[in-house]
Amino acid sequence: MPKHPLIAGNWKMHGLRDAIPEALAMDTAARQSRASVAIFPPSTLLFALSEALNARPEPSPVRLGGQDCHKDAQGAFTGDLSAEMLKDAGAEMVILGHSERRHGHKEACESVAAKTLAALRAGLEPIICIGETLDQRQEGLTHAVLSKQLRDSLPLALEGQTFHVAYEPVWAIGTGHVPTDDQVIDAMLLIQKHLAQRFHNQVVPHTLYGGSVKPDNARHLLSLDGVDGLLVGGASLKAEDFNRIIAAAD
């Protein structure tokens, strides 16, 4: 386990203003942990959460992020948000290439790379997600799929920048199914080898695991070789659960 694991909570399309107290409770837990903690709420909550966290007596260690961004800074793109807009609303980070975007919105690796460039221009720290489907794993294509996603989703402009990569096997997201230890370690080491060969950053990227992360398995997942943090979905919505995951990093 790294000295400061990154624990990131992806709220997805959940959360209204009445969720703000949950985030404040997560902030309290983060102050007592050695982990770096980030919350990715729906964009409608970014500004309100930023204001609430900044109103606390001491600066909050919790960082906020967006769940996606457009590749352009502005334009006639109804319903989209630019990286600059996320930044203006209080975001410091952004999730890109999540499987729910890749598969639900037919988002290609080249689009993820373009969005990554947009995030860097806006001063956002990206978490770039990759992962194979169950069919791809069963066909023995996991390494080929992950390698292609890494190659095509991560632009060379990431050289010298702070960024992170999250491995989320598509078949484990929201299903309760978690890969075996060997499967997780194998994927993480592949990612780290790729990053070491392509980039020579002073700040070593965190490699995160995501997919059915729960309070009961968080500590074990963090103990696996190559796992520098966790990208948490449903278990990040309630402070009672997310705070236990934060505590697992200590």
Image: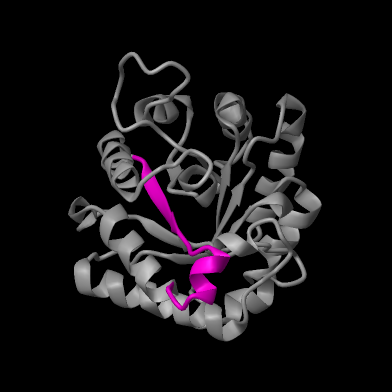
Q: Quadrant of residue 50?
A: top right
Task: From the viewer's side, name the closer residue of 200 and 74.
Answer: 74
Residue drawn at (30%, 16%), measured in percent from left and top? 75
Instruction: Give how far across and how far down residue 80 sits, in percent.
Output: 44, 23
Instruction: Give how far across and how far down residue 194 sits, in percent.
Output: 29, 72
Task: From the viewer's side, name the closer residue of 139 and 183.
Answer: 139
Task: From the viewer's side, name the closer residue of 97 and 121.
Answer: 97
Q: Quadrant of residue 82?
A: top left
Instruction: Give how far across and how far down residue 216 sits, in percent.
Output: 77, 70
Instruction: Give how far across and how far down residue 111 sits, in percent.
Output: 32, 42
Q: Is residue 10 left or right of residue 71?
A: right
Residue drawn at (75%, 65%), measured in percent from left and top? 215
Q: Is residue 214 left or right of residue 162?
A: right
Q: Is residue 238 visible?
A: yes
Magenta span: 124-141
Q: Residue 202, relative to residue 139: is it above or below?
A: above
